[in-house]
Amino acid sequence: MKQDSSKTIKLKDGRKLSYIEYGDLKGKPLFFFHGWPGSRYSGKETDEAAKKVGVRVISIDRPGIGLSDYQKDRKLLDWPKDVVELADHLKIKRFSVMGVSGGGPYIAVCA
């Protein structure tokens, strides 16, 4: 059985944010936003294609989903702060975003 490679960081406000990486771990970074229902594991569907094209997929659990802590009174506009904080933690200065279904509004708010 393959070991789960999920990781968790502690955000500045004390919450935990969980993510897992797929694709080419040395490739161009892309944050993947899962649909509803879903979790960080939804990014697995990108793994093979991302490896072929040199993309590092960072798939994140939104607050209250999976291993990420719930955020009281959370608004959609709070999401980009979490993404940027994770990018800073991973020392990523420039990245793309991708999502499916319920992840669409999270793409839009990051744009």
Image (cartoon, helix red, strand yellow):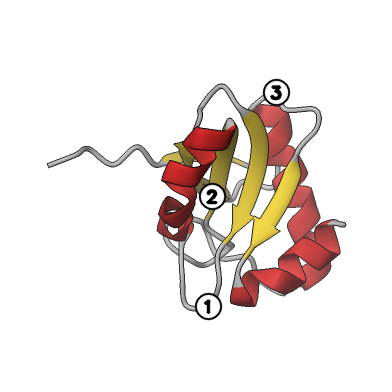
Give the CA distance from mark 3 to mark 2.
16 Å
Identified at 28% across, 42% down, the residue is 4
Q: Are marks 3 and 1 in contact (CB under 8 Å)?
A: no
Q: Earlier in the sequence, mark 3 or mark 1?
A: 1
Q: Which dot marks residue 59?
A: 2
Residue 21, horizontal then vertical, whole percent:
48, 39
Who is closer to the viewer here, 72 or 108? 108
Disc 1 residue crowd, few under 14, some 14–19, many 20+, Cα 10 Å:
few
**How many numbered marks have been drawn onto this rendered protein structure?**
3
Figure quadrant of the C terminus: bottom right
Q: Which residue is mark 1?
A: 36
Residue at disc 2, secondary structure: strand
Amino acid carrying label 2: it is: Ser
> In x, y percent, where is residue 30?
66, 42
- Dot 3 or dot 2, earlier in sequence: 2
Look at 35% across and 37% down and name the residue there: 5
Q: Mark 1 is on which residue type?
A: Trp
Can residue 74 be seen here? The reply is no
Seen as rendered, the residue at the extreme left is: 1
Q: Is residue 44 left or right of residue 71?
A: left
Q: Are marks 2 and 1 in contact (CB under 8 Å)?
A: no
Residue at the image point whose x is 58% and y is 63% from the top? 63
> For the residues marked 2 and 1, what is the alpha-carbon distance in whole angstroms?
14 Å
Q: Residues within 10 Å of mark 3 (few under 14, many from 20)?
A: few
Q: Relative to residue 30, is residue 42 depicted above or below?
A: below
| Badge 2 or badge 1: first in the primary sequence | 1
Residue 109, quarter of the rendered image: bottom right
| Image point (72%, 27%), residue name | 92
Residue that mark 3 sits on: 91
Quick one: SS at disc 3?
Answer: loop
Amino acid type indicated by mark 3: Lys
The dot on residue 23 is: none
